[in-house]
């Protein structure tokens, strides 16, 4: 069993990770990148109460089972004791349409009901503050517990509040409800929660019915799609890379990063994966967020990442009171990569709009106004296509001219030419096609290494980069092109360890990478599928193996130990979840999702 045996619940305002015993071990409030109210996942050797946790423990428990309610983000945990007592815990964050808008309150709901025998539970709710440095003072009332802090919190419940504060057991003879959120009155808690539960279940199942994934891996695609949607900040449309910070890429590697921000690159992969299964709203909202941020600058320039609102990324620092995942610190807040130059961003920004120009249903169709707003990204791409940068892997050493960044600059021009052709703007189509052709020629000459018979990570370089497996998907090369076959062979020779692909193997600021980057293996699977023939069967077998590495809930982190299949890195990782959809769609046949 993977040590990241966690389930994600959320609603677009907040997200929470729950372990196999039904304990909330990670939840930031009042939003994804906020202070971890429950942070025991990163508490290290400190007491769980110091880092914050929300446990519902069946006294004498001997067995638990856990699963999502079908086609929802609602988690059900059943716990059994040795005497026949049993409880069922239902966890969710409310999300449904109300008054024509999506209602996503900053609220975590937990319901406990008896399902067998005489069950006694202990509830331990210990929200923390200041990244585990400050305990929250509490005040007790008849139907709630208030916790001081910013924001002030309230746990509303029909369970005995004195027992919760004291950590003493009480009998479960009815349904007990716990609603944690900002310090506001709720009303009759069980009735409110039951209504929220029914409407949230209906919302997710209606959302899933509108999808159209491949039937062969239907459940894997649905779980991936729901997970991706949970990483979209509903208030602005910004998409975060992952819910967590500082789960290391490999044991004691120091590769601990804060991923609770919006990378235009990661978001591009997310919206394109969701668009492949028919979810277009996310594309429009992420693109609107990105355009708004770009146009707030003097020249429509982009930076590597954005906070999920109009604020700024905090300066990278270490949260000293949290010991780290399994004691493997540091725990970082903020991300210094926000200061880097990454030239691929302009291609990803233009590519994010592709589903809008490809969609023929009319509602979300790209138009001339949108095209004009995208053109400044193309001008940046023309200027930067052969300029050194940190690359998509955000190397913190010397800048180089990364081939993938150059390819994405080509993508910006190529897609603008396609969009202009679609809109019948002939002069702009010719202009952008000429830019694309010129950049294509530069890359073909300067990034091709005759000795390796492959495209290399950098211009005039001799190392490899797994991101070049995306060349056919991006349209830069056909999968049948001998140059791509040579690049795949070289990557297999140098970057593939066992069945899994590393992003690169050369030494960086933190030494040599120890674990495989999961999305690179997904890119490899896609490349094999596109090459066809026996390669396609190889792709199917490898895809099944990667799926077997998911945790019990169908979720994946960022990295994988190729020897043990243990997951590492921030969790769940949107790159990885998007890879599930992309590979399933590449290997399967599209069809309307069957009703459940």
Image (tube, rainbow, N blue to C red):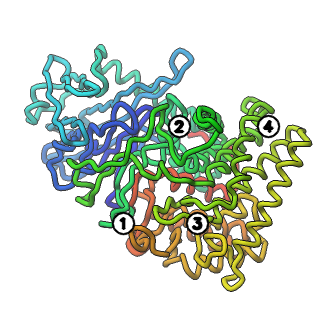
Task: Return the residue at label 2.
Answer: 238
Task: Return the residue at label 4.
Answer: 360
Q: Residue 25: in sight, yes or no?
A: yes
Q: Which residue is pictured at 10% across the width and 36% down the height?
A: 167
Q: Quick one: quadrant of the C terminus?
A: top right
N-terminal of the pair, mark 3 or mark 2, is 2
Near mark 2 (Cα within 10 A), the count class, few <14, some 14-19 or many ≥20, is many
N-terminal of the pair, mark 2 or mark 1, is 2
Q: Which residue is pictured at 70% across the width and 51% down the height?
A: 381
Near mark 1 (Cα within 10 A), the count class, few <14, some 14-19 or many ≥20, is many
Q: Position of residue 207 (x, y in %)?
A: 57, 34
Separation of marks 4 and 2 at Cα, in angstroms: 25 Å
Near mark 4 (Cα within 10 A), the count class, few <14, some 14-19 or many ≥20, is few
Task: Return the residue at label 1.
Answer: 250
Depth check: give the residue in front, 434 or 205.
434
N-terminal of the pair, mark 4 or mark 2, is 2
Separation of marks 4 and 1 at Cα, in angstroms: 44 Å
Determine whether label 1 and label 3 are within 8 Å by CB: no
Identify the secondary structure beneath mark 3: loop
N-terminal of the pair, mark 4 or mark 1, is 1
Foreground: disc 3 or disc 4: 3
Determine whether label 3 and label 2 are within 8 Å by CB: no
Depth check: give the residue in front, 23 or 398.
398
Foreground: disc 3 or disc 2: 3
Task: Return the residue at label 3.
Answer: 400
- In the displayed structure image, the side of residue 406 where residue 433 appears, left or right: right
Determine whether label 3 and label 4 are within 8 Å by CB: no
């Amino acid at each position: 069993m993977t040590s990241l045996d966690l389930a994600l619940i959320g609603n677009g305002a907040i997200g929470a990770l729950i372990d196999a015993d039904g304990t909330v071990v990670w939840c930031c409030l009042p939003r994804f990148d906020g202070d971890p109210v429950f942070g025991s996942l990163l508490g290290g050797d400190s007491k769980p109460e110091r880092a914050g946790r929300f446990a519902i423990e069946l006294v004498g428990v001997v067995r638990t089972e856990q699963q999502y309610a079908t086609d929802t983000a609602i988690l059900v945990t059943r716990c059994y004791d040795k005497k026949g007592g049993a409880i069922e815990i239902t966890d969710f964050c409310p999300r449904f349409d109300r008054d024509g808008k999506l209602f996503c309150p900053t609220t975590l709901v937990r319901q406990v009901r008896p399902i067998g025998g005489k069950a006694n539970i202990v509830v331990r709710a210990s929200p923390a503050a200041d990244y585990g440095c400050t305990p929250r003072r509490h005040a007790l009332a008849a139907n709630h517990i208030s916790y001081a802090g910013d924001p002030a919190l309230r746990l509303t419940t029909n369970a005995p509040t004195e027992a919760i504060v004291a950590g003493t057991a009480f009998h479960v003879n009815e349904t007990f409800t716990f609603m944690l959120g900002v310090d506001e009155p709720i009303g009759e808690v069980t009735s409110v929660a039951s209504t929220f539960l029914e409407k949230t279940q209906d919302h997710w199942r209606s959302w899933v019915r509108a999808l159209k994934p491949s039937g062969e891996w239907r459940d894997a695609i649905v779980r991936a799609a729901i997970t991706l949607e949970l990483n979209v900040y509903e208030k602005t449309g910004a998409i975060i890379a992952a819910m967590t910070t500082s789960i290391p890429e490999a044991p004691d590697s120091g590769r601990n990063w804060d991923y609770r921000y919006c990378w235009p690159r990661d978001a591009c992969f997310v919206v394109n994966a969701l668009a492949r299964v028919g979810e277009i709203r996310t594309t429009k909202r992420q693109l609107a967020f990105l355009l708004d941020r770009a146009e707030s600058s003097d020249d429509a320039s982009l930076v590597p990442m954005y906070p999920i609102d109009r604020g700024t990324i905090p300066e990278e620092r270490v949260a000293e009171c949290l010991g780290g995942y399994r004691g493997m610190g540091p725990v970082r807040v903020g991300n210094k990569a926000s200061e880097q130059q990454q030239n691929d961003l302009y291609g990803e920004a233009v590519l994010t709009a592709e589903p809008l120009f490809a969609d023929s249903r009319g509602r979300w169709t790209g138009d001339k106004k949108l095209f004009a707003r995208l053109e400044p990204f193309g001008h940046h791409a023309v200027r930067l296509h052969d300029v050194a940068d940190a690359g998509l892997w955000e190397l913190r050493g010397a800048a180089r001219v990364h081939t993938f960044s150059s390819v994405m600059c080509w993508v910006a021009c190529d897609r603008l030419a396609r969009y202009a052709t679609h809109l019948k703007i002939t002069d702009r189509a010719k202009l952008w096609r000429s830019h694309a052709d010129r950049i294509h020629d530069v890359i073909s000459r300067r990034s091709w290494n005759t000795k390796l018979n492959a495209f290399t990570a950098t211009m005039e370089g001799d190392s490899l980069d797994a991101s070049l497996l995306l060349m056919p998907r991006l349209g830069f090369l056909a999968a049948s092109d001998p140059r791509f076959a040579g690049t795949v062979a070289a990557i297999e020779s140098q970057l593939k360890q066992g069945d899994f692909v590393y992003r690169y193997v050369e030494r960086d600021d933190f030494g040599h990478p120890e674990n495989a980057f999961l999305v690179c293996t997904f890119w490899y699977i896609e490349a094999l599928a596109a090459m066809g023939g026996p390669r396609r069967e190889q792709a199917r077998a490898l895809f099944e193996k990667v799926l077997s590495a998911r945790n019990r809930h169908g979720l994946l982190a960022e990295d994988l130990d190729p020897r043990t299949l243990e997951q590492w890195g921030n969790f769940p990782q949107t790159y990885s979840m998007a890879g599930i959809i992309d590979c399933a769609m590449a290997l399967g046949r599209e069809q309307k999702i069957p009703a459940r």
